[in-house]
Amino acid sequence: MTTYIIIASVLLLFFTLGYFRHKRARSKVVNVVDENCTRCQRCVKKCRRKALEVVNTEAGRRIVLNPNKCTACGDCLAVCKFNALEIVSRGQMESSATPLV
C-alpha cells in the first residue's frame, strides 16, 4: 500500500512541476546582459533548444536569444560564470529589446 502512495506522490510531483515549468516557459525568457557577457559561448553550447546563438554585428560579436525557442529552463544560467544571463518576463524583454544594426 505504501508503495502505491509513494508512486502516486512521485507522479503527482512530476506532473505538477512539468505544468509549472510549461507555464513559466510561456511567461518568462532569458535576457543576455551584454555588459557582463564575455562571449565564451558556454551558454550557447548548453542550450538544448538552440535558443542562443552568436551573431556578428558592427559592434562585434554578441550572444542573442531567439525568444520563440526559449523555455526559460535555466540551463544556460547554470553554466554562466559571469552573471550575463537573467530570467525576465516576456513583456519586459520585448520592451527593452534593442534592434541589431
Image (spheres, rainbow, N blue to C red):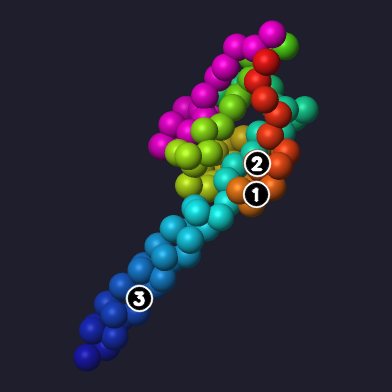
Where residue 91 is drawn, which disc sits there? 1
- The amino acid type found where label 3 is placed reads Leu
Residue 53 numbered tag: none
Identity of the residue drawn at 52% across and 24% down: 53
Q: Which of 31 and 38 is in front in this view?
A: 31
N-terminal of the pair, mark 3 or mark 2, is 3
Q: Is residue 11 above or below residue 28?
A: below
Task: Provide the secondary structure element on which disc 1 rests.
Answer: helix
Q: Give the numbered dot on residue 94.
A: 2
Q: What is the spatial separation of the Cα atoms under label 1 and label 2, in whole angstroms?
A: 5 Å
> As drawn, is 3 to the left or to the right of 54?
left
What is the three-letter code of the residue carrying label 1?
Gly
Q: Start and end of the magenta stretch?
A: 42-58
Secondary structure beneath label 3: helix
At horizontal 27% and vertical 77% (from top left) the residue drawn is 7
Residue 52: x, y in percent? 52, 30
